[in-house]
Amino acid sequence: MFRTVAAACLLLITGAAHAAVDRIEILSRTKFADGATFGEVGAYEKLRGRIWFAIDPKDPANRAVADIDLAPTDARGLVRFSADLAILRPADPAKASGTFLYEVNNRGGMGALQRFAEAKNADDPGTGFLMQRGMTLLWSGWATDVERSPNALLAQLPIATDRGAPITGRVAYEIIVDAPSDDAVFTGMRGTAYPRADRPDAVLTERTTPDGARSVIDAARWSFATDVVADKPGKLRLQGGFKPGKIYELIYTARDPHLVGLGLAGIRDLLAYARDNGIEGAAPAQRVLAFGISQSGRVLNTMLATALAIDERGRAAFDGALIHVSGAGKGSFDHRFAMTSRHFSMLEDHAYPTESFPMSPASTVDSTTGETGSLLDAMRAKSLSPKLMWVNNASEYWNRAASLLHTDPLGRFDLPEPDNVRIYALLGAQHYPGRDKARGNFANCVDPLQFQPVMRSLLSALEDWVRADKAPPPSRHPRIADGTLVTVDAYKRAFPHIAGVALPVSNLVPPRLALDTVPPTVTGSYTTLVPAPDRDGNDRGGILPAELLAPLGTRTGWNTRTETVGFAGSTGRFDGSFLPFARSEAERRASNDARPSLAARWNNRESYERAVRVAAERNVAQGFLLASDVDVLVARAGRFYDRVRAHDPKDRGCGYLFDES
């Protein structure tokens, strides 16, 4: 049996070079996956604990932390904070590969095992891909405004004060509901609220469009349904109820802002420590790779842009990073009254800065302001060039402004990637592998594409790039120059007719915001583009998985909301669509579908599987699939073929999309 390690198991860190990490405490140590073994690497162990930091606010490396001069300090003048810690590593330290994969957690949760190994949860190894490579997986808390739960990874960050007096400021929270409700949570996805200052100035408004006029709701009609406390979601109650099709906005004076940017400094300092020291008997990291999904990818973008990816010794915090589905965004991660769970979207969170110049790793000019810059300017100023991969799915071109990673801010021309950068568009895929068996809020069934095989190949390529300087596949994304990156209007003109399918009104058009008021003032907008469709409606110009090269239907990065839930025609935040081909030519003609039918493409399952195998082997040759995944992918595609062929188009259910075998 592995022991559970109590508070007595402390790792005390000393020495000026590592003063930022004060100590690490391992609280538990257990077998992972019931002691399952993973090839020559053997078994893995799981450690949970806490890490304490003590940083010098005067160190130049820490000056990027907003309000750092307003943080409480100890007798030595240091700012102290702590974070939860989780580690998965080979039980035998000699079997570790030396590669540390640090995942920036997303709202307290771990996603790397699912994203690379198709795991069902954080205790499931899935395919075992990461373990078979001998990687050490590392997580830590960085945000404090996340709803508490037993396994959430959080940070405990100090509160800024004005020489001991409370700091106050106006904060804004936006709310939409998908069904009528007497009450509504106003703190977003698993977020928590800032405490209210003792001022009776809270205002609730409603409007019908993001840029529409706000109408004030009579204060007698609404109230706080719960106390507003720093560690719980906030909820409002409204007489007559909240209704779909309206955007509600709550503004009040808050107090006690946390130094949210310290969470990013903590990530940096943990990785610096892992590079130079062992944790509980393990060897130091030989290579540090960072990984982030969505929000946590935007954290990495923010760290790169603000110099918080440079440690106190002037080194890059990580040797390489795979930044997934972040679009071109940064986030509300390092300013007063920051809210880490909020991000600007089509209908939600318009008061929160996400896209702001510069957004591309290539240097460019914002012709609207005359400003010149790059997302990597802070790194280049220190002659640092970690190897970076951005991977956006099709949904990020519709909902996360992904085109701004590789075009100028007005969408007029393509930008060249620096040598240490790769940008990939994983087409045919939504933000996460779709899993909803009903249409729910959306007009179409979700896109069920399991894109983890592509992610495995890219992580493998990143590790080889960092370890052996073996170049990964060239960037693969839609481009203006070859006509594969287009306006939404051009997309609509090229999209084939499919009976009953309404195209989205727009993609995400991020605003330029003046942040000196709450809510901020919109001063203009950026220009975003989307992948052009082929004759089947499938995207062109990026990584085309085998399921897109040998299609059974149209896979889009968008799905539209229905009238029932409000804002019909607007895209969902994360969801794509799967629109199957007609099964026969007679069925196609009856529905006036412009796309050739399944029968016109494939004689039977065997002919379809042969086409998928050819496509998969093409992906292997291009570096976007591991050879070990080909057989599994072909078998999975064959089962999907059977389900699509058997599905009656009159059945509006979506359960047929999912493999229950």
Image (spheres, grey):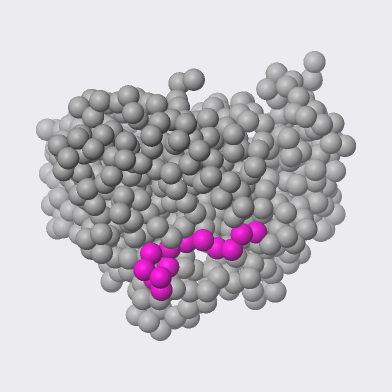
Point 68% across, 45% down: residue = 101
Q: Is residue 648 above or below residue 577?
A: above
- Using the image as rendered, state which of residue 423 and residue 89 is in the foreground: 423
Where residue 165 appears, as percent x and y from the top left, is 48, 54
Residue 474: x and y in percent read 59, 63
Q: Above or below — where is 538 with respect to 611?
A: below
Residue at screen point 56% across, 49% down: 619
Is residue 532 a member of the stretch shown in magenta? Answer: no
Which residue lies at the image location 15% right of the left edge and 50% below the top edge? 208
Q: Position of residue 2 (x, y in %)?
A: 79, 20
Front residue (pair 226, 622): 622
Check the picture and name the quadrant holding the N terminus: top right
The majority secondary structure of the magenta stretch comes to loop
> How many numbered tags mark residues here?
0
Q: Nearer the viewer, residue 339 or 227?
A: 339
Q: In this rendering, would 98 be left or right of 411?
A: right
Q: Which residues are magenta?
A: 472-484
Image quarter for residue 9? top right
Q: Looking at the image, which residue sits at the far right? A: 94
Task: Specify whether 432 is left or right of 456.
Answer: left
- Residue 165 appears left or right of 632: left
For the point 55% across and 70% down, the residue is 417
Q: Is residue 482 magenta?
A: yes
